[in-house]
Amino acid sequence: MLEVFGVNHRTAPIELRERIAIGRDELAEVTRALAGVPGVTEAMIVSTCNRVELITASDGADVDLGGFLCEQFRLGAGALDGHIYEHQGKQAVSHLFRVAASLDSMVVGEPQILGQVKEAFSVAREAGTVGGQLEHLLQSVFAAAKKVRTETEIGSSSVSIASVAVELARRIFGSLNGRTVFLVGAGKMSELAARHLVQQGAGTVLVTNRTAERARRIAEPLHGRVIPFEQIYEAAAEADIVITSTGAPHPIFRREHGQALLHKRRNRPMFFIDIAVPRDVDPAVNKLEGLFVYDIDDLQQVAVSHLAERGRHAEDAEALIAREVERFHERQRTVSAAPAIVALQRQAEELRQAELKRAQARLGPLTPEQAEAIEALTRGLVNKFLHPPMQALKQAARENDSARLDSICETYSLPAITEANGPATSDANAIVIEADKASVSQSRPEVAVRQ
């Protein structure tokens, strides 16, 4: 059984999301812990500033994913009440398709989520917690998300977190010309926000990161200056706009830091864009006159104003994803016919081998060429005879026609087919693919048997 269990920006406030946020360095360890929960057979975790989702395949037993989250993050009883969503089976599949296509994002159409889901899958792969079921599902999810980006215009009119931040900065300062920008933590979103600010006229760019090399890689194309991480408070006093995303477990800018910054800047205003979860800037800083703090949830309010512009493109993307989800389920139903196809092939092969032995006894010794010709002839005939019932099995499975499936299975004494409960395994997909290759073969070998 496939299940998605989590919270996102719509169901939980940032105060809860930051308590269960999982950093990149600890993601593999937590994913392995999730895979160790009784009943879980495969697992991966998507953890971003806007969502934490546990994605599991189970053996059918009840899996206590809420208990896992509470124990992992030492949450009290009832901490998750009213904030969790759960999707199982087909609903879980649909949810994952929509998430990767950015249709469930705070900013519909933003491109970062697909990369974040891919990274989560890569971490799970390296941790050894995914197998055939999630492998097959996620590959289909990624293909559909790419299709959305290339076949709809959802990305062309999207409003990224970066552009939202620029709009807020413009509201506060009026003109951005000559403003100093300080990147604290060298994340992708903060880098993108800095690029937007520079394009809108911002001047000096300062960059700091715990890894100096990473700071240099971001600073160079922006013609920026690298600041040693231990000098962040001195450098912050130079900045009009601070974009922070460090991944630190506790705020690095607290009220006392804000007061000191205002004093050094002689009460000139500062704008903090805090896109970190957990937050890098204590909410108390926002209460100081002249300091403006916007966290990831605040940015949503600006994004909402652009929903009408993105609505039509989002509808196109929703329709495409719905088709891709249905195609995936059709494939699942087809794969559910794999055991019957295997049984049918086995029956035919046993009959073929028996007839070959009977014919060989009558014909006597054959040359290698003659044996090869008879082998090709019998295989070709079997493939042709198998083609109609195999296609009928797959078609009935795709259409979920259980009566027809039962009839075919009964006619050929095949095992009964049950609808798949989760993503197909790679072995089952391989069976269907090989069956397709064999059954559509229309070659007619020319055989000359010489005595």
Image (cartoon, rainbow, N blue to C red):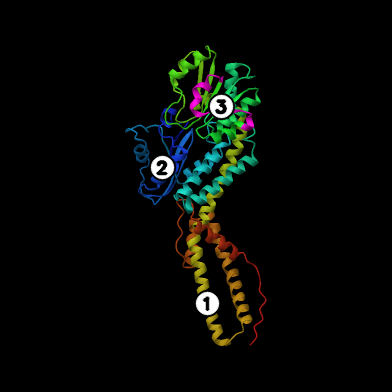
On the image, the x and y values in percent for residue 419 come to 46, 54
Q: Which mark is residue 303?
A: 3
Magenta stretch, residue numbers:
220-240
In the current view of this chain or complex, which residue is farthest to the left?
Answer: 77
N-terminal-most mark, 2 or 3: 2
In whole angstroms, how far apart are the C-alphas of marks 1 and 2? Answer: 52 Å
The secondary structure type at the circle numbered 3 is helix
On the image, the x and y values in percent for residue 237 come to 53, 19
In the current view of this chain or complex, which residue is farthest to the top?
Answer: 266
- Who is closer to the viewer here, 31 or 442? 31
- Read off the residue under disc 2: 30
Comparing marks 1 and 2, which lies closer to the viewer? 2
Q: Residue at x 52, y 50 (%)?
A: 329
Q: Amino acid at mark 3?
A: Ala
Q: Residue at x 60, y 69 (%)?
A: 384
Q: Which mark is residue 353?
A: 1
Comparing marks 2 and 3, which lies closer to the viewer? 2
- Who is closer to the viewer here, 80 or 229? 229
Q: Amino acid at mark 2?
A: Val
Q: Is residue 322 magenta?
A: no
Q: Which mark is residue 198?
A: none
Q: Quadrant of residue 241?
A: top right
In whole angstroms, how far apart are the C-alphas of marks 1 and 3? Answer: 68 Å
The secondary structure type at the circle numbered 1 is helix
Q: Quadrant of the C terminus?
A: bottom right
The secondary structure type at the circle numbered 2 is helix
Q: Is residue 423 above or below residue 250?
A: below
The answer to whether 65 appears left or right of 148 in the picture is left
Q: Is residue 443 above or below residue 37?
A: below
Q: Is residue 237 magenta?
A: yes
